[in-house]
Every structure is written in C-alpha cells, then in structure tokens.
Image (cartoon, rainbow, N blue to C red):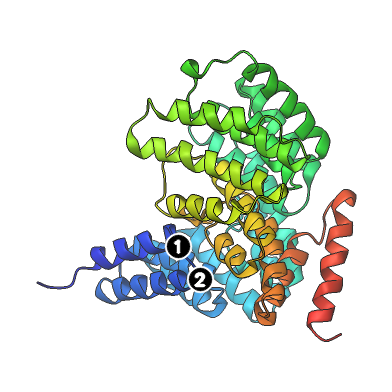
Amino acid sequence: MPERANLWYWLGETTIHFPRGRDDYEQGLAHFRRAAELDPNNANVLLHLHVAYSLAGDLTALAENAELRAELDGDEVTRLYARWLSAGLAGDSAAAAEVGEEYEAGPTAFPLFPFDTPAALVASWQIGPIVQSLELLQNNTIPGSASAMQRTFAVYYGYQDLGMQERADGVLSAFERATGARYDRMRLLDAIYGALPESAGLAAAGRLQAIHDTLAVERWTNTSAGERIALEMWRIMHDDLSRVPATTQELREYGTGLAPARAMGTEVQALLLEAMVQVRTGDPAARRTIEAFDELFLQGPPGLGVDVYDAMVLAAADTYERVGDPDMALQALERESNFNNLRAPYGARFARERGRLAALTGDTVRAIREYQYFTLMRSQAELSLRREVEEVRAELEILRGG
C-alpha cells in the first residue's frame, strides 16, 4: 500500500491538536514534514507546517515555509508576509517597516497576531505592526457579517496579549452593542487571569450569578455548564469555596442526560473544581483528583469552549504546582488550545507561566525564551500590568546571569 500524504497530515494534525507534552509537537512536525515530502504542493500541509514550526519556535524554517506558501498561493498577502518575516530574521527593520506600510495602505489586515506565531521574538519593532494589524482588522469588521465574531475575538484576544485591557474591553463591548449578545463568561475567565480588569470580572460575575440563581438544572445547556464553572473558578480564586459542592453535584446531574462523550465534559469540570478546593484546604485527595481530571481531559472531551478549555488548563497547572509537582504543572500547560490554530486566549499568560515553571524545573533556556516572548508582548502594556512585566524582566536578567 503506497504512503499517502493525507494520512501523515492527519497524524500530524491529531498529534499537535491533542498534545500530551512538548515531544508531541516535534512528532507532529515530523508527520507534517513527511506529508510535504509526499505532496510538496499541498497548501494545507504547508499551512499546518507553519503552525508546527511556530510551536517549535523554529523561525528560520518558518520563513522558508512562508516563501514556499507564497510561491504556491500567489496571494499578495502571503507574499508580503514572507517578505516581512525574512526581513525580520535578517534584522532589516527598514525593509520590515516598508512591508508594514504596504499593508497599511491596503485593505487587508497585517496577518501577524501575538497569538499566531513566536516570530514576534525576532525584534522589538514588531509590536508596531501587530497593533496596526489589530486596528486594521477591527476597522474592517462588518457587524453582522459571517466573519464578524471570529474577527472580533481575534482582535479582542490580540489586545489582551499585548496587555491593552481597555482596548480589549472596548472591542468586546462594541460587538455586544452591535449584536445584542453578552459574553460574560469570557469576561469572567479573562479577568481571573488578568487579561481584563478586576472590575470587569466583578460585573460579569454579578450578571451570571443573577441568571444562575433561578436557573434549574433541567434548563441547563453546555453554555450554562461553562458559565457555572467560570463562576466557581472566579469564587475559588477569591477564596470563596462555599458553593463548589452544590455546583459539582449539579454538573454531574446535568451530565446524566447527555451522551457519554459530552457527559465526560461535565465530569472533567466537576473533578477540576474539586481538586482546586482540595488543594487549598490541605486535603490529601487533591493529587488523586487532579490526576483523575487529567486522565479524562487528555481524551479531549467535547463541549468545552476554547476560553473554558484554556482556563481549565491554567487551573490544572496551578493545582499540580500546589501539590508539589512543577514538572507536571509545566506538562499540563502544553495542552494549551493550539487545536484552534494558535488563536488561543491567554497567550502571554501561558508564556509567563511556562517560563516560571521552566525556571523552577531547571530549564533555563526555555525559561529565557518564554520570558522574552512575554516581555515583548507586554512591552506596551497598560499601567496596571507594568509591574508584572518589570518583575519578569528582573527574573529574565537573573536567568541570563545579569
């Protein structure tokens, strides 16, 4: 039976979408490379190689892949991106700025986001084009269009990664006004991890609590379950553990009426909440509970929104660290939602935590790389976030031996 490129592509996609650790990124990259050898003109394979090289942090390969994509695609945006990346790797800021000006003069947003590729490590001048990209994408989003939600969330999370809380909140507020929808679960989770101000989290928690005070389990949806875990995570982070037993009971009750795969999702949520409480109250069962959560979580239960998924990953890592296992905490962070083509919430937050845990486990090289990414992304952060940026810069100097 002859080898098929699509088989290797599928193996690569499965591996990087559901990683068990850093090694899976390298394995996924190897699968995509083999697919490209068998079908070098497959644009979809080259696009996923872009994702794999980004995850691996291989900027040279990323630039070469961009050039191949530009030759195949023929699209002006793809060609300009390849030119921009090559200029950055060569340290030619003038050439890179020239590409940025061409984008700014055109109707298409600059295709680089802080959550899209670690190419932002190339040089500090890249923050300008990233902001330009977000502004162009925001200004070219038509409310009510098919792409409006996707574009809005891309801009929203992009500003968050840059530490521009007010801009992020303004983007989401404008979208809510235009559509009549509310995204309080997102706001609440984002406030937990510092992507939005505490005041935004308090307001969102109040609105969600008002809904859930009178919402019987029989009327729950997957959205309701996600809102409840967001509420409980918010309370736990604010030292209120009182309602967790009732919520875990309701999650499991809701799960009894679901298909087995979706019921697994509610059990995963319940186990995480229990582990978060146990580790804060000194219950020795915390280790067993977080491992039980992990076993199910690795099976990729459906029904979890990307924001809930990533918030749970961060909470699981925190729980592992609290039970005294920073190695497992770091491994847990590798499960960030890269299945969404790297457009994940909390990109800077993940880098911050990966760097801190890498330093704890003795991986200085990785800690430096993650801290560099974080400090670059937050180099223009709002005043309320600058203290953390300065703390990370100080840690970075220590790691470098300064």
What residue sits 43% from the left and 57% below the top? 17
| Element type at mark 1 | loop
Marks 1 and 2: CB-CB under 8 Å?
yes
* Camera sees residue 227: no
Q: Which residue is mark 2?
A: 22
* Camera sees residue 401: yes
What residue sits 60% from the left and 41% below the top? 273
Q: Residue 232 at what x, y percent from top left?
A: 66, 34
What residue sits 64% from the left and 23% below the top? 178
What residue sits 66% from the left and 32% below the top? 231
Q: Which mark is residue 19?
A: 1
Q: Is residue 137 rendered to the left or right of residue 74?
A: right
Q: Residue 118 at what x, y percent from top left?
A: 61, 67
Q: Residue furthest top?
A: 214
Residue 308: image quadrant is: top right
Front one among 206 and 108? 206
Q: Residue 382 at what x, y percent from top left?
A: 85, 50
The span from disc 1 to disc 2 (Cα, nearest Å) is: 7 Å
Residue 284: image quadrant is: bottom right
